[in-house]
Image: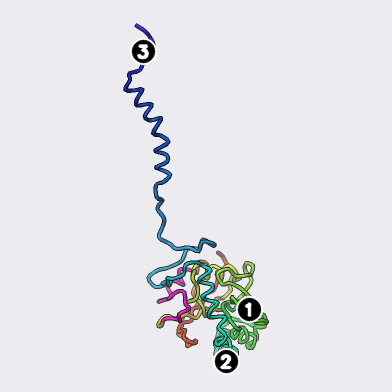
Amino acid sequence: MKNNQARPPILKYLILSLFLFFPFFLLLFSLKPKHHQNTTTDPTSKIQIHSSGDLKIRPGYASYESYIQRQLHKTLNPKLRQVWTTRDWDRKIQVFVQFFQDLKRKELLFNESKALSIGARVGQEVEALRRVGVSDSVGIDLVPYPPLVIKGDFHNQPFGNETFDFEFSNVFDHALYPDKFVGEIERTLKPNGVCVLHVALSRRSDKYSANDLYSVKPLVEMFKVSEVVHVRKVDGFGLDTEVVFRKKTVT
């Protein structure tokens, strides 16, 4: 009897079959559809859109560029810009002066504060800050308006970390990426710095808004390293609620 017996034919066929079909199985596995989370992101920044029951992102933007173009359509509208710089100029400045003076009385804003107005358009808020004594103030918007407003995207502020003591915005509803909007505020605020947001809760904003906010809860959730100072009702050109945050000194 020989020591090296021939392998049974069926075993040979099994080994040969495995050898031939192994590459085929690998190909099928590579073509298997991958499961993705049901979130929408900007393909450039990879920032997740925050959407919940009390914060709805408006649909209809095919890309971030299409969103920017829609915002520019309002900002560059010649009729609106004429209104902002003439009829509305003094009226809005007077209202903002009252807001900022009240914040100064509450010791949330000081003459020596370095202040930023986010989405300032033609800079009424910046002018109001300077009139109440906060001389180191500037605004950002997609379209600059020198000397009050420089060019900047509030989803990606053109400033270094911990630059400002105070930041104000009444354009939260125009943020396509609210998480990024808030994240940039917290990034550029100094520890103990103050952020003031004017938002609309009881009414829907204009057709250029990118989100709808129904309570302050989503804002509180998005401000990761800040605490709420106060929430109060205001009358701010269609915006009805003021929410104030203070960045924590230890994060």
Measured as percent of width and height from the top left, residue 204 is found at 42, 81
Disc 2 residue type (three-letter): Gln
Secondary structure state at the residue bearing disc 1 = loop
Quadrant location of the C terminus? bottom right
Say above or below: 76 vs 42.
below
Disc 3 residue type (three-letter): Gln
Q: In this rendering, which labeled residue sits more in front, label 2 or label 3?
A: 3
What whole-number distance in Å separates the C-alpha atoms at marks 2 and 1?
A: 22 Å
* Colour scheme: rainbow
Q: Are marks 2 and 3 in contact (CB under 8 Å)?
A: no
Residue at mark 1: 144
Mark drawn on residue 5: 3
Q: Quadrant of residue 250?
A: bottom right
The residue lying toward the viewer, choosing from 59 and 224, is: 59
Secondary structure state at the residue bearing disc 2 = helix
Secondary structure state at the residue bearing disc 3 = loop
Mark drawn on residue 94: 2
Label 2 crowd (10 A; few <14 / some 14-19 / many >=20): some
